[in-house]
Amino acid sequence: MNPISVRNVDALFAVNERLVTWMTTPLGQLALVAVGATCVARIHASYDAIVTHTGQSAKTHRYERPIPVDRGGEVAMFEMGSTVILLFEKGRVKWDASLAAGSVVRVGVKIGAKSS
């Protein structure tokens, strides 16, 4: 994420390329929103042949059967820089105290736990 762009581009996360993947998890429903950075042309879904293209109309695809994703497994790939937004059901996740606005999160780093 580029903090300068976030501060200076109105509704940046609404105009950039995005791919929303809904999942059923042990913590309930989860929306994983992949947001392509400025000038990113494509986001590739790892679970299907879905590739987003800047300027394309929004599309929805529902699967008859859930597609399993292993814990820590790849969900999507970016062709360049990116932001991932995770939305859990209210009260299901207790975020790690080390997280703060602007934190960089790397693959495999714990960001939270099941709320008690």
Image (cartoon, rainbow, N blue to C red):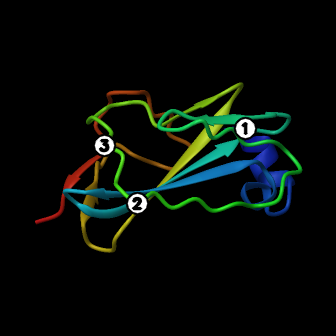
Is residue 91 rendered to the left or right of residue 3? left
Secondary element at tag 2: loop
How busy is the neighbourhood of tag 1: few (under 14 within 10 Å), some, or many (20 plus)?
few
* Residue 74 pos. (x, y %): 42, 30
Mark nearer the N terminus (1 vs 3): 1
In this rendering, is residue 83 above or below 74?
below
User: In the image, is residue 73 above or below residue 100?
Assistant: above
Residue appearing at x 31%, y 32% in the figure? 72
**Marks 3/2: CA distance?**
13 Å
- From the viewer's perspective, tell me whether residue 89 is left or right of residue 7: left
Give percent across and percent down for residue 97: 29, 49
> Distance of mark 1 from mark 3, alpha carbons?
32 Å
Of tags 1 and 2, the one toward the viewer is 2
Query: Three-letter amino acid code at disc 2?
Result: Glu
Indicate whether 34 appears above or below 107.
below
- Tell me the distance, in whole angstroms, between the alpha carbons under discs 1 and 2: 37 Å
Instruction: Give the position of the N terminus as an image quadrant.
Output: top right
Q: Which mark is residue 13?
A: none
Amino acid under disc 3: Pro
Residue 64 circle label: 2
Query: Looking at numbered disc 1 in the image, what kind of residue is underneath it?
Result: Asn
First in sequence: mark 1 vs mark 2: 1
Q: Are marks 3 and 2 in contact (CB under 8 Å)?
A: no
The circle on residue 68 is 3
Q: Where residue 113 appears, x then y in whole percent?
A: 20, 51
Say the numbered circle drawn on residue 2.
Answer: 1
* Closer mark to the observer between disc 3 and disc 2: 2
For the point 67% across and 36% down, which residue is it? Answer: 43
Point 81% across, 57% down: residue: 15
- Of all residues shown, which one is farthest toward the right? 55
